[in-house]
């Protein structure tokens, strides 16, 4: 079944613990936590203290997306804070393979992401070290953007390659995913849909999540 990972960038931060309970009860499979440093991407969100705090009140899978420069400096701290999945950016690391191995050694699932302008083939040498691959369907840094259509061809290409290699790593898509675009992402080969405003901007979280799964 297609998994849904609502992004808390669109949540009410004054009620973040309550929001996590609400999306869990609505059928979300995990929660997407976008960490931005204002360097790798032109925005700043939240970091280790927030994740550590909400970990105390939620047993959801924490899908932590590190949109930060040189993420290897903080992998252990994010693991200690409660991350279950840690995604690094191919463009932010000098040794992607080493960081993915470090993530796994800390007991977390490993994931690598590529921006829209980065060929998905760039990460092929590292696929066997990945439990998940995140294909950005918008330029990272801000929520509420529209999906860039050509990025779905990267999902199809990646799906073909993982199937060819017989790998079980899941494919996640992030950016502009809503009731209108989710089906195209699924048809391209996505396993996990990250959605922010289409879930948290809805009056009915459960219905919004059902609409994403189609």
Image (cartoon, grey):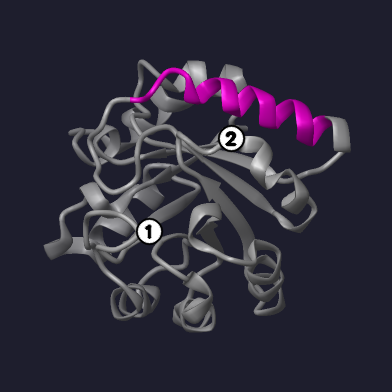
Q: Which residue is drawn at the image coordinates 24% and 45% (left, top)?
A: 142
Q: Would you say residue 162 sits in the magenta stretch?
A: yes
Question: Of residues 208 and 126, which is closer to you in this image?
Answer: 126
Badge 1 crowding class, 10 Å Cα cut-off, few under 14, some 14 to 19, many 20 or more, is many
Give the farthest residue toward the front. Answer: 94
Magenta residue span: 147-163
- How far apart in space, not on screen, are marks 1 and 2 (Cα)? 24 Å
Q: Is residue 121 visible?
A: yes
Q: Which mark is residue 33?
A: 1
Q: Is residue 80 above or below residue 208?
A: below
Q: Which residue is drawn at the image coordinates 64% and 67% (left, top)?
A: 95
For residue 133, side relative to residue 14 (left or right)? right
Secondary structure of the magenta portion, mostly?
helix
Q: Is residue 51 above or below residue 32?
A: below
Question: Of residues 27 and 143, which is closer to you in this image?
Answer: 143
Name the image quarter holding the N terminus. top right
Q: Is residue 196 above or below residue 90?
A: above
Badge 2 crowding class, 10 Å Cα cut-off, few under 14, some 14 to 19, many 20 or more, is few
Q: Is residue 214 visible?
A: no
Q: Say whether disc 1 or disc 2 marks the residue closer to the N-terminus.
A: 1
Q: Would you say residue 193 sits in the magenta stretch?
A: no
* Quadrant in the picture for residue 64: bottom left
Question: Of residues 158 and 80, which is closer to you in this image?
Answer: 158
């Amino acid at each position: 079944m297609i998994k849904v990972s609502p992004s808390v960038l669109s949540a009410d931060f004054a009620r973040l613990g309550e929001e996590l309970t609400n999306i869990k009860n609505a059928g979300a499979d995990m929660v997407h936590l976008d960490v931005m440093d204002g360097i790798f991407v032109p925005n700043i969100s939240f970091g280790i203290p927030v994740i550590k705090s909400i970990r105390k009140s939620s047993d959801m899978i924490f899908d932590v997306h590190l949109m930060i420069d040189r993420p290897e400096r903080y992998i252990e701290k994010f693991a200690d804070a409660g991350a279950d999945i840690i995604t690094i950016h191919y463009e932010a690391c000098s040794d992607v393979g080493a960081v993915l191995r470090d993530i796994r050694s800390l007991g977390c699932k490993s994931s690598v992401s590529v921006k829209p302008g980065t060929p998905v083939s760039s990460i092929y040498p590292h696929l066997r070290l990945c439990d998940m691959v995140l294909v950005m369907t918008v330029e990272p840094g801000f929520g509420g953007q529209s999906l860039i259509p050509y990025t779905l061809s990267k999902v199809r290409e990646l799906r073909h390659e993982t199937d060819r290699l017989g790998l079980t790593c899941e494919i996640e898509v992030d950016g502009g995913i809503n009731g209108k675009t989710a089906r195209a992402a699924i048809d391209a080969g996505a396993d996990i849909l990250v959605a922010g405003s289409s879930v948290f901007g809805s009056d009915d979280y459960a219905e919004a999540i059902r609409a994403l799964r189609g």
